[in-house]
Image (cartoon, helix red, strand yellow):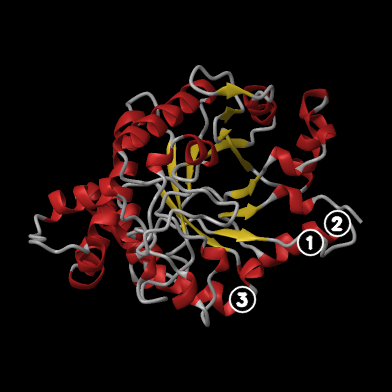
């Protein structure tokens, strides 16, 4: 009897918690995370066992640090699959552990400049037949099975070598440089990938559509099978996360998976978050431990209502494992005290901030 009453009380408490205005924020232990990219920091921060860097992290009261485990073909740990850069994140993690600061690795998935350059057949093709990618972002085809296995093996190795608390999947989408898309120009900017031979073949096998004697399969898919193609694209992304989870999640390894998503509402840009990026946030939230939308309002020159509308949508969609990522523009402050005060005032607990290099005063 007492036990049943206790269960009822617990269920009521959980219901109240999930029904609150903050239910879109992940229920976790007050994470104050920071993304850290060593190529954006003074070299002195790597010296003396990272002592100066650790002191800065403690000063800002961050309790979790996220940094890339690799970049292209270069690893920031002792790798057997990639080239070693000389930077050893194992030592950095060890110093963080002394201060009880959690450690997460950022793992770029389908953005891979090295593979894009060296393996032409995995370069994605847009609806116009173009492989050209004119920005610093260089995506490969997300459906290429050889590359998918290669990247999963790298992520698994990084986890085994570094034993992080979190693995944060970045660029886990079809090619889209979302930071360059504005509300007024999206029809001219957004390109739809991927229509390479491999993707077309895989989509036809997945959908079982009859293409007949049609000579322009890309146009047929883009017009008659647009929704089905979007479903296939989201399956490519979701299945990658699922396959990775099956590889890394064991009874001994309780590592948490974070998936970074682009900051678009479901109906924004004609449903582009699914149709173009291939991200089904609801489906991803059921596999990953946390969904981390990159709500970079400063970068996009959007006001705070933009942030609220996104978080409110997660709340309405009953996606409760949200760990938002916010940005902070550099050269806004005169000293580190101003930065610290701003962070405490602007952001509540449970966030990841982009990025530490923008907290270094240079003026």
Residue to which mark 3 is pinned: 302
Q: Which residue is drawn at 61% across and 62% down?
A: 348
Task: Find the residue positioned furthest to the bottom.
Answer: 184
Residue 358 visible at all: yes
Q: How crowded is mark 3: few (under 14 residues within 10 Å), some or many (20 or more)?
A: few
Asked which quadrant contains residue 244, the reply is top left
Cα–Cα gap, marks 1 and 3: 22 Å
Q: Can residue 254 be seen in this view?
A: no
Depicted 207 relative to depicted 64: above or below = below
Q: Is residue 19 left or right of residue 3?
A: right
Circles 1, 3 touching at the beta carbon (< 8 Å): no
- Which residue in the structure is indicated by mark 2? 337
- Does 146 sit left or right of 220 as displayed? right
Distance from disc 2 to disc 1, alpha carbons, whole Å, reads 6 Å
In the image, is 95 to the left or to the right of 363?
left
Residue 150, percent across and down? Answer: 39, 30
Which badge, 1 or 3, is on the more N-terminal residue?
A: 3
Which tag is nearer the camera, tag 3 or tag 2?
A: 3
- Asked if labels 1 and 2 touch by Cβ distance under 8 angstroms, the answer is yes
Residue 227: x and y in percent read 22, 68
Residue carrying label 1 = 341
Q: Where does the image place residue 228, in percent across and percent down from the top left?
A: 19, 63
> How many discs mark residues in the rendered view?
3
Compared with residue 271, is residue 85 higher up or lower down, i.e. above or below?
Answer: above
SS for tag 1? Answer: helix
Q: Nearer the viewer, residue 307 or 44?
A: 44
Give the crowd class for mark 1: few <14, some 14-19, many >=20 residues within 10 Å: few
Nearer to us in this view, 189 or 301: 189
Judge left or right: residue 21 versus residue 276: right
Residue in the foreground of this view, choosing between 146 and 78: 146
Element type where label 2 sits in the image = helix
């Amino acid at each position: 009897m007492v036990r049943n009453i206790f269960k009822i009380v617990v269920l009521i408490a959980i219901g109240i918690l999930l029904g609150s205005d903050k239910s879109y924020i992940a229920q976790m232990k007050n994470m104050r995370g920071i993304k850290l990219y060593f190529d954006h920091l003074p070299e002195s921060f790597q010296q003396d066992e990272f002592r100066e860097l650790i002191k800065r992290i403690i000063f800002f009261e961050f309790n979790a640090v996220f940094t890339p485990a690799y970049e292209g073909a270069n690893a920031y740990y002792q790798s057997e699959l990639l080239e070693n850069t000389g930077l050893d994140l194992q030592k950095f993690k060890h110093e963080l552990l002394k201060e009880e600061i959690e450690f997460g690795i950022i793992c770029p998935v389908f953005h891979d400049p090295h593979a894009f350059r060296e393996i032409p057949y995995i370069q994605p093709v847009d609806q116009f037949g173009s492989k050209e990618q004119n920005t610093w972002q260089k995506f490969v085809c997300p459906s290429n099975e050889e590359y998918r296995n290669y990247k999963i093996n790298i992520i698994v190795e990084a986890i085994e070598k570094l034993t992080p608390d979190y693995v944060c999947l970045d660029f886990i989408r079809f090619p889209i440089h979302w930071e360059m898309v504005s509300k007024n120009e999206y029809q001219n900017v957004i390109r739809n990938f991927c229509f390479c031979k491999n993707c077309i073949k895989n989509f036809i096998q997945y959908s079982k559509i009859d293409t007949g004697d049609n000579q322009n399969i890309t146009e047929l898919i883009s017009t008659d099978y647009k929704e089905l193609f979007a479903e296939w694209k989201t399956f490519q992304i979701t299945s990658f996360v699922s396959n990775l989870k099956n590889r890394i999640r064991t009874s001994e390894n309780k590592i948490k998976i974070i998936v970074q998503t682009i900051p678009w509402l479901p109906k924004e840009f004609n449903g582009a978050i699914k149709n173009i990026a291939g991200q089904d946030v609801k489906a991803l939230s059921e596999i990953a431990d946390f969904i981390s939308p990159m709500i970079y309002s400063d970068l996009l020159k959007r006001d705070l209502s933009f942030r609220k509308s996104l978080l409110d949508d997660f709340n309405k969609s009953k996606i409760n494992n949200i760990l938002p990522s916010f940005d902070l523009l550099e050269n806004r402050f005169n000293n580190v005290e101003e930065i610290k005060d701003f962070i405490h005032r602007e952001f509540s607990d449970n966030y990841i901030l982009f990025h530490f290099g923008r907290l270094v005063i240079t003026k």
